[in-house]
Image (tube, rainbow, N blue to C red):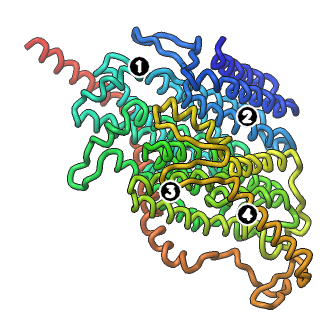
Amino acid sequence: MSELDFLFAFAAVLIAGVMCCGRDGRAGWAAMAVYGAMLVAVMAAAGKVAGGSIPSALGFSVLGHKIGWRMDGLGWFFSMLTAGAAFFASWYAAGEWGRAQPGMKTQHLLLALNVAAMLLLVNAGDLLSLFIGWELVSWAAFAMMAQKGGPAQPAAMRYMIYALAGAMAVLAGIMIVHAVTGSFAYKDFAAAFGAMSSGMKWLLAGLFAAGFGVKMALMPFHLWQAAAYSETPGASSAFLNAVSARMGLFALILVLVKVMGLSALAGLHVPLIGLSAKGLLMWIAAFTMVIPTFIALMQTDARMLLTWHGIGQGGYMLLGVLVGTGLGTAGGLLHVFNYATYQMALFLAVTAVIHRTGTSDLDRLGGLITRMPWTYVTLLMGIIGLAGLPPMNGFVSKWMIYRSLLDSGSAFLLIFAFVGTLGTILSVYKLIHNIFLGRLRPQHEGVREAPWSMVAPMLALGGIGFVTGWFPGLALNLTDIAQAAMGAPELPHGLGGVATARGSLNMIWVVSILLVAIGFGAIVFYFLGNRRYEVNQLNNYAGGHFLSPQVPYQFSHEFYPGLARVIGPWYRGSIVRAEQGIGTLLDVSGDLWRGIYHLAWTPLYLLAATVIALGWAIMGGM
């Protein structure tokens, strides 16, 4: 058995074990151990995939075509993220949080099914096995989203409608490729693509970009994700946010970048507007960076705020990869890794707040910093990473994407990236302020820190973000393997960062100087200033005055009223109306399909089938 077969075997054994013993209180810890073993197995395979690929014995024949699975450097990178995210999700769910959840056996089972489906997807050896994995991921994610019931079910159903439409686009593209090449193999598709007509290239690029873009929530296919992910239970939601939407990015990289090639996409020109197919995708990524980010700014629920940011961060990843340089590709892939660490930490921290307070409503929280200090530290590290600021790892990947855009002369795209970061900084400050800073709510006076079974994985994720921000070369060693499999230019780097002809980044110096400055400030504040006045958390302080609990003074509601006045009408007038229109269209489509399958229509179907058959027979006789 190869290392890939061991991964598949681990996944199968875990599914069987959870189905058999999932109600046992130790099931979560056992699942965590299996995911840890899977992560170790993936890391052990790094040497082999760096110089080639690892085949699997799993495979079968369809219509005379042998299909199978094979792990290369790109699949290895996403397998590592999948196993790692599952490890932290199961660790979090193994203790007190899992014991407080109804139907935890189902959650363990659905997490195992999602991991197995993702491993099949990212290690697909041809287009048909890719589609099999794609559909399994869609259905496994749907089950995970819908498990809670209530508002989660319509959100999951909306996702499924989007996913089915995307799947049909992908299947149509695969069937066209097979009709042209007579094969499902990637190499045959790549060899034939260059000789195809421009119209055929556009058709295939459009089908695959739209189909895969649905799962990545690229605009305009983004309206499903925020509600679907935020309504999923905490640890499962953290897993979906960390890696599930990145499955769309994987497929886009595989088919559009690796198989079709960026040079071929750059040669497809859009009439009248002067853009290529590559440029059009880059602008779609740019708008995906900005618009969902400012929608996040309008949210008053912590989970919705973070899921909208998840959509925006995907735009950064895709934009970096599409630049196509060594720096851009490495920055995009590194941002996938970085995002998985800080977004998962953020969702687990918000889940801890919900576990203790019963709410994620930002207008009903505040002042929890002294009640939940370790959760505060986790959220602080996470929002610094999300905002792309030092010393966390998000700064490194965003800097690389900025630098690659500047080097490639994409000034307007660079401006979009900066604007997206500005919106992120504003909204994540709102997040941490409204949960942890300001006045403590009287009803939360007795709140205490989450248990260590929840705090430990949160802090571990925050620690990974800090260490890979201080020493980014550790994470860049991982992206090297994926870049090599993509055929992207190699990026020379060291432990502290990268050095290019037009700019360099050494995070060892940046973070070290920053830590010295923070330490000096702490000394001055705690030992030399001695002018502090401690205010009870049920009180407040503003404008030089101490405010008692009797004074109704709270900053959490309408946090950015000026921006809200500017963005609000546009948001309600454009985004909300568009979402309502799409929702109405989906409802009408659902009613239509229900009518089609209604028993009362059966005679009409038989009549139509008879007329068609008679017409075919008459035409054949002529």
Residue lying at 51% horizontally and 31% vertically, measured from the top left: 484
Mark 1 or mark 3: whose residue is earlier in sequence = 1
Which of the marked residues, 4 or 3, is nearer the chain's N terminus? 3
C-alpha gap between disc 4 and disc 3? 21 Å
Mark number displayed over residue 591: none
Determine the secondary structure under disc 1: loop
Is residue 113 in sight in this rendering?
A: yes
Kindly indicate whether the residue at mark 3 contacts the one at mark 2 (C-beta within 8 angstroms).
no
Q: Label 1 vs label 3: CA separation?
A: 36 Å
Q: Give the amino acid at mark 4.
A: Leu
Residue topped by disc 1: 185
Residue that appears at 44% across and 48% down: 586
**Amino acid at dot 1:** Ala
For residue 450, what is the image quadrant? bottom right
Identify residue for label 2. 106
Residue toward you, 264 or 233: 264
Q: Name the residue under label 3.
A: 402
Q: Tell which circle, 2 or 1, labels the residue nearer the N-terminal end.
A: 2
Q: Label 4, secondary structure: give it.
A: helix
